[in-house]
Amino acid sequence: MKHTGFFGQWGGAFIPEILHQTFAELTIALRQAQDDPKFWQEYLELMSSYSCRPTPLTFAENLTKHFGGAKIYIKREDLNHTGAHKANNVMGQGLLVKRMGKKRVIAETGAGQHGMATATMAAKFGLECTIYMGEVVVLRQRPNVFWMEKMGATVIPVQDGSKTLKDAINEAFRDWVTNVDSTHYVLGTACGPAPFPEMVSWFQSIIGTEAREQILARHGKLPARVYACVGGGSNAMGIFQGFLDNDEVQLVGVEAGGKGLSTGMHASRLCGQDASPGVAQGYKTMFLQNSDGQMLETHSVAAGLDYVGVSPILSDLAEKGRVRFESATDDEVMTALDLTMRMEGIIPALESTHGFVQAFKEAPELSPDEAIIINQSGRGDKDIFTIAHAFNDPSWKQFIIARAREYSK
């Protein structure tokens, strides 16, 4: 979807003067790619041969029987190479980097999946790669950090601020300002200055295109509702675009309710009371901020949802009433994760599981001849430390202690 950079009152490009030319060049490269059918065909061929596109649409038969009501289908972005939807955007931007002749890429990452995808892309295309990651997140996502480094990326823990995703984004922008000639910033979500929200959404639209074709083939008609977790919003924008023009399909975004919306320990921008319009990190959207415009602390069991802002496109869709926003607490997420693993043998990422929570609440109120789709944006093996800790698994604790003793010898 080509756009001016604004979505209603949201979006824009509030950037320092030194980046204006870089953003102009990026916008031109994006427009040329959008106008070139060969580019999209190259992208599709790359994703089908290097990743796992089209990803399956899985009928969750056991969960459907358990809840009654609508048939539950799961869009399996977890089966993408590197384990999440992030590869869709990253490989697309990698093709743009080749066109622009840049030799280095930088990225921020929250859950680590975007960093993993960027490191993978850089290895494939022969690019130098630096990943910025909040120090808190480095500790939560150590397996992803290990693989990023093994693929040749430099991972820099960010110690500023809350040491989470927003701080990693700030540090990545600081890097870009000083290395504009050689470097492209592979922004990971549908946020930031234009043209990033549009560009990321364009590459992620492959999810919705596939899901639409798949549900029509499997179910014979469009779904009643589509659910996706919402951090920055890239996976939600990806699947929602397949159904935006069909008003009979309800689109439901599920934000991080953390410890509860009344506690202040959450990351809900569009369904809570703590967010307000603001301009930060180069764009206008709803931010979790105080009356002085200072960003609030956020909390989620899912590192990839632990962010103060949200896609300006989703702010616009919320304002128009096209997307309904809900929240899921950490406890609800762990319960839904446990049920999904035991009943379907599927391990969604903690981020994705937020969408499962709301879908499980609403499936029973729909009739059996209707279907719903949950976008499983990533796989849960990256969260093994967080999940094992949350479940208070004694055998896992013993394993960690034993390995620590072994490594200390």
Image (tube, rainbow, N blue to C red):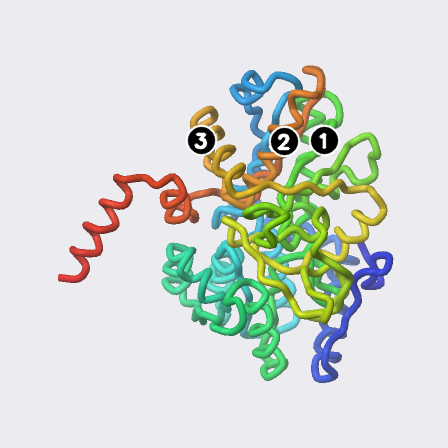
Q: CA distance from mark 2 to mark 3?
A: 16 Å
Sequence-first tag of 2 and 3: 3
Looking at the image, residue 159 lies above or below residue 123: below
In front: 164, or 21?
A: 164
Vertical comparison of 208 with 137: above or below: above
- Residue sitting at 23 percent across and 45 percent down? 398
Q: At which x and y percent is residue 239?
A: 68, 42
On the rendered structure, is 56 left or right of 408?
right
The residue indicated by pointer 3 is 341
Residue that carries the numbered disc 2 in the rendered image: 359
Q: CA distance from mark 2 to mark 1?
A: 9 Å
Residue 41: percent from left, percent from top: 67, 50
The amino acid sitting under disc 1 is Arg
Mark 2, residues whose alpha carbon is within 10 Å: few (<14), some, or many (≥20)?
A: many
**Proximity of marks 1 and 3: CB atoms separated by less than 8 Å:** no
Of the numbered discs 2 and 1, the one sitting upstream in the chain is: 1
Secondary structure at numbered mark 2: helix
Q: Residue at x 58, y 34 (%)?
A: 356
Label 3 crowd bin: few (<14), some (14–19), many (20+), radius 10 Å: few
Q: Nearer the viewer, residue 392 or 142?
A: 392
Residue 39 can be seen in this image: no
Q: Label 1: which residue? A: 225
Dot 2 and dot 1 residues touching (CB under 8 Å): yes
| Marks 2 and 3 in Cβ contact (< 8 Å) | no
Task: Say which residue appears at 59% left-offset and 76% top-offset.
Answer: 183
Q: Is residue 307 above or below residue 380?
A: below
Q: Is residue 84 visible?
A: yes
